[in-house]
Amino acid sequence: MPRSLNVLPKLIILLLCASPTARAQSFEQRAQTVLDSLYRSDTTMVGLLVHVEAPDRGISWSGASGRSMKGGPALDPKAPFLIASGIKTYVSATILRLVEEGRLKLDQPVGPLLTERTSNLFTSDGYDLQAITLTHLLTHTSGMDSYTNYGYIDSIAADPMHRWTRDEQLARTVRMGTKLAEPGVHYSYTDVNYLLLTEVIEGITGKPFTQAMRELLRYEAMGYEHTWMPTLEPMPAGVLPLAHQYWDERGFDSHNIDVSVDLYGGGGIACTTRDLARFNHDLFTGQVVRDKATLASIHTTVITQDSVQDGYQLGVTPENVLGQQGYGHGGFWGSKALYFPDLNATVVVAVLERGHRRATLKQLNERMVALLGP
């Protein structure tokens, strides 16, 4: 046998015996190179955040590139940020925990689960709350209009520090909008569905939805130490300042807008990429909702009669990345969390300028999945 071939078995053994730490470091170096390259490729980029959770490969890595604010200090991988609509997966998981405990059923009508004030408000606008179920709210097939339409962004620009309440946003839905369809007929993504779900959570538990979510999802036991709802909960000790998130098209800086514009279930959570990745990974691997049948229901879809087939599930959107099917959710400011079952890996990516959310998030997800390999 040629000498070059004789050393091959030894080389293979060395590679196979390489420690998980060494393999993870190799991944870290390549992933950081991707981040830095993308950041340098566009002068309008503010900052990028990534976390990859892949326990089968010994990887639990957070990375960052850029600045925590325009002209500010370097962005720390542990910097928290607003995940906006990423909260919908948390709200869905909380509902499923209540289902798991036998306190709710997904096919329940929402009418009896809401406050009298809210029930009267939506009934007066023609909504049949005995026909709308929790599943309709969770899948955005309730037929409800959205308070975020009809000049909502303009109203934020005019008075960015206005402190909104959930009741105020629910009332705006009825005042400004109109019923779109009967439940199950039409898909229309709208935050009001999830504001109603947090009211349901409060009615069933008798606690503020923030406290109920924290307890039912077991934040403390699961180690989600850097997750909270700004203004509704105290900032955890030892957490870095919130990163600045921008929407340059409208001149918005998240630090100059009251968080209540997106706080009561449609958005609201601030956390690190690590906490967001760990929560999604724990959820989809059965560590949050432990009953298998209940967890499987998170992939429920409602096939509507219109032509809009988004595939939206219970607070979860499916997305294929380089042939890998992922499940998770994105957020308004420019973030996305995806769990990939075939890789048993979760990838969280975030940009600090909303204008980059589509192209850059797509590139980041593709590059991270490619690095993880089949």
Image: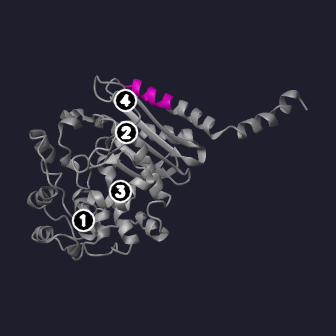
Instruction: Indicate the secondary structure of the residue bearing disc 4.
Output: loop
Is residue 305 visible in the rendered image? The answer is no
Do labels 2 and 3 touch, CB within 8 Å? no
Q: Is residue 318 left or right of residue 3?
A: left
Which of the two marks, 2 or 3, is nearer to us in this view? 3
- The span from disc 3 to disc 4 (Cα, nearest Å) is 26 Å
| Residue 252, image quadrant | top left
Label 4 sits on residue: 75
Which of the two marks, 1 or 3, is nearer to us in this view? 1
Magenta-drawn segment = 32-42
Between 265 and 249, the one lying in front of the other is 265
Instruction: Indicate the secondary structure of the residue bearing disc 3.
Output: helix
> First in sequence: mark 3 or mark 4?
4
For residue 350, the mark is: 2
Which of the two marks, 1 or 4, is nearer to us in this view? 1
> First in sequence: mark 2 or mark 1?
1
For residue 90, the mark is: 3
Is residue 151 visible in the rendered image? The answer is yes
